[in-house]
Amino acid sequence: MSTLLLIINPHTIIAAVGIVGVIAIVFAETGLFFGFFFPGDSLLFTAGFLASQHQLSFAWLLIGAFIAAVIGDSVGYAFGKKVGPALFVKENSIFFDKKHITRAQHFYEKYGRKTIILARFHSGRPHFRAIVAGIGNMTYRTFISFNIIGGFLWTWPCFG
């Protein structure tokens, strides 16, 4: 098996970092800009399986993964809220265009609640949903409500 496959193999990761590492990876995947590198879904399923075999604490994994997912998204939201608008200061920037922030605001007004929940299950770019919600000025009260629902639906069934 190649070294790269060994590194990204969920069982290898769990064996190396344990339950604290799994929780940290769930946080990083959901809350940090570079988190899309982590194998969140397969890591959760593998951790759930190992917990069912009494190799990890089921209770700590269940509660820790849920809290890490919710806090991770909240960090992403805060990052988007704080840093996002500054990226769109210039009217015609090379990388960022003000019309994109306006489009994000309209999108999150219309579809934001569903997006916060459902994007967790999408294999494309779900890692940016919280950041874009912050950039798009979704209210934190709405965000956190649907973040909690999405975090629960994403983590708890993995251990069922």
Image (cartoon, rainbow, N blue to C red):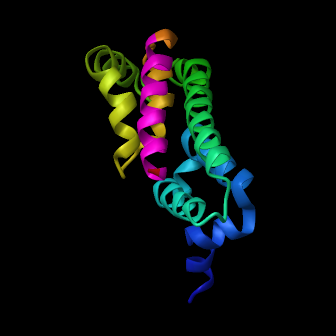
64 displayed left or right of 149: right
Quadrant of the snapshot with the N terminus: bottom right
The one of 142 and 62 positioned closer to us in this rendering: 62
Whether residue 154 is situated above or below residue 39 in the rendered picture: above
Q: Residue furthest left?
A: 110
Residue 130 appears in the figure = yes
The residue sitting at 43% across, 13% down in the picture is: 142
x and y percent of residue 134 in the render? 50, 21
Residue 147 shown in magenta: yes
The residue sitting at 42% across, 22% down in the picture is: 146
x and y percent of residue 20 in the render? 74, 51
x and y percent of residue 111 in the render? 27, 22
The one of 96 and 158 positioned closer to us in this rendering: 158
Whether residue 139 is situated above or below residue 63 in the rendered picture: above
x and y percent of residue 145 in the render? 46, 17
Over which residues does the magenta segment extend?
142-159
Residue 94 appears in the figure = no
The one of 100 and 128 positioned closer to us in this rendering: 128
The residue sitting at 34% across, 22% down in the picture is: 112
The one of 113 and 33 positioned closer to us in this rendering: 113
Residue 97 shown in magenta: no
The residue sitting at 67% across, 53% down in the picture is: 57
61 displayed left or right of 135: right
Q: Quadrant of residue 37?
A: bottom right
Label tally: 0
Q: Report the magenta stretch's main SS.
A: helix
